[in-house]
Amino acid sequence: MTRKFTGDRLVIASHNRGKLEEFSALLAPLNVACVSAADLSLPEPEETESTFIGNARIKAKAAALASCLPALADDSGLTVDALDGAPGVYTADWAFTPQGRDFGLAMEKTWALLEEAKAPFPRRAQFRCTLLLYWPDGHEEIFEGVAPGQLVWPRRGAEGHGYDPMFQPDGFAETFAEMDAARKNAISHRGKAVDALLKACFT
């Protein structure tokens, strides 16, 4: 049976300020105060699993046990059919450079691999998001959201982040990077996962 969240503080198991602000805004109407792992000076655990659920569990469990509070972790990425599901859990790693993450380079790499493979059109892909809510007693709830679509080139749009400029969701002529935040969130992988989380555990 799904466990309802009954506390008033939740740890967001991330050092990403944007994610903290995003979840704080979503949960503010429910009188839930969010604090990040960074705010609590918690170390970032190494993500060693090969699945989104596995890596989300590593982050949420570490934060919950260290803080003695329920913790929410998010693991997400892009899976490309013609690349056997890559980059998948390594989505952010494909953007790694010694100077920091460069998703422009990551998108160029992704398209180059599709060209090399002579992948047929449309070049199908999915954005995937896994949310895992973990309590200090070991109970967990898992929610997943998927946004199906195709990859396009050249890149289009200046909104969003990551691979958004090359991802065109099903049913739309624009890429995620050509949509404002409200339109994107209504159909995005993260939006779907958050919606499921809120309905199950917070309402």
Image (cartoon, helix red, strand yellow):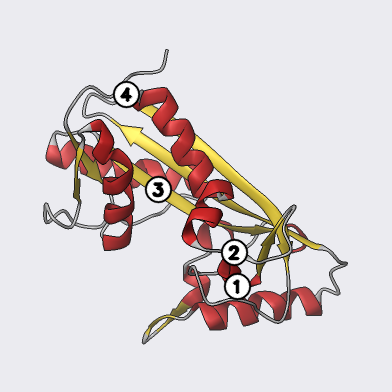
Q: Nearer the viewer, mark 3 or mark 1?
A: 1
In the rendered image, which residue does mark 4 sit on?
A: 139
Horizontal relation, residue 165 to residue 150: left or right: left
Between discs 3 and 1, the one toward the N terminus: 3
In the rendered image, which residue does mark 1 sit on?
A: 165
- Quote the CA–CA distance across marks 3 and 2: 19 Å
Query: Residue 115 versus residue 27: which sits nearer the camera?
Result: 27
Query: Residue 65 versus residue 34: which sits nearer the camera?
Result: 34
For the residues bearing labels 1 and 4, Cβ distance under 8 angstroms: no
For the residues bearing labels 3 and 2, Cβ distance under 8 angstroms: no
Q: Which mark is residue 126?
A: none
In the rendered image, which residue does mark 3 sit on?
A: 74
Q: Nearer the viewer, mark 4 or mark 3?
A: 3
Residue shown at the point (73%, 53%) measured from the top left: 170
In the rendered image, which residue does mark 2 sit on?
A: 176
Between discs 3 and 2, the one toward the N terminus: 3
Q: Amino acid at mark 2?
A: Phe
Q: Nearer the viewer, mark 1 or mark 4?
A: 1
Q: Where's the N terminus, which quadrant?
A: top left
Q: Residue 112, how many percent across, how many down?
A: 72, 81
Query: Residue 136 versus residue 27: which sits nearer the camera?
Result: 27
- Quote the CA–CA distance across marks 4 and 2: 34 Å
Few, some or many residues within 10 Å of mark 4 (<14, 14–19, 20+): few
Residue 153: quarter of image = bottom right
Residue 51 in view in this figure: no
